């Protein structure tokens, strides 16, 4: 079941990523947008790496994050790969 949110471009679909907030019409999670932004990529640059996302959708995802930080941070933590599972060449220092 698709559930709308108070954000125009953000929905939750039980069949996509277990109901994690996504950009409507895609499988791109708000979490993916936020993690890209946290790596230092400017919002205006994110659509270059995710050409299926518009700038408006990126800003709406970041707005959703601003309103629901604890929810999205929990998804980020839940999906984090532990350093032990990472190749030594890509581990965090």
Image (cartoon, rainbow, N blue to C red):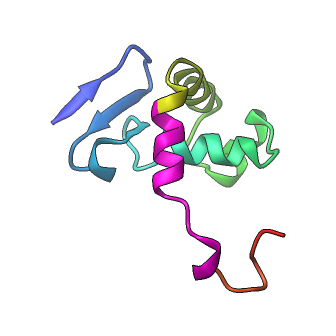
Q: Where is residue 10 in the image (x, y as percent from the top left)?
A: 42, 28
For this orientation, the residue located farthest to the bottom is: 88
Decide: is 36 above or below 57: below
Q: What stretch is highlighted in magenta?
A: 71-85
Decide: is 59 above or below 74: above
Q: Where is residue 29 in the image (x, y as percent from the top left)?
A: 47, 44
Quadrant including the C terminus: bottom right
The image quadrant that residue 85 belongs to is bottom right
90 with respect to 24 (left or right): right
4 with respect to 73 (left or right): left
Quadrant including the N terminus: top left
- The answer to whether one can see residue 38 in this image is yes
Q: Per the image, is 78 magenta?
A: yes
Decide: is 83 above or below 3: below
Q: Position of residue 91 (x, y in %)?
A: 74, 75
In terms of secondary structure, what is the magenta stretch mainly?
helix
Residue at x 39% of width, y 13% of height: 6
88 with respect to 33 (left or right): right
For this orientation, the residue located farthest to the left is: 1
Residue at x 21% of width, y 43% of height: 14
Q: Per the image, is 81 magenta?
A: yes
Q: Which of 79 and 54 is in front in this view?
A: 79
For this orientation, the residue located farthest to the front is: 84
Residue at x 52% of width, y 23% of height: 64
């Amino acid at each position: 079941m698709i559930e709308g949110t108070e954000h125009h471009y953000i929905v939750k679909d039980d069949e996509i990523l277990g109901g994690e907030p996504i950009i409507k019409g895609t499988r791109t999670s708000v979490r993916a947008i936020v993690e890209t932004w946290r790596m230092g990529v400017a919002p205006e640059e994110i659509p270059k790496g995710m050409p299926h996302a518009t700038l408006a959708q990126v800003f709406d995802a970041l707005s959703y994050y601003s309103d629901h930080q604890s929810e999205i941070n929990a998804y980020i933590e839940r999906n984090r790969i532990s350093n032990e599972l990472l190749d030594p060449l890509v581990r965090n220092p």
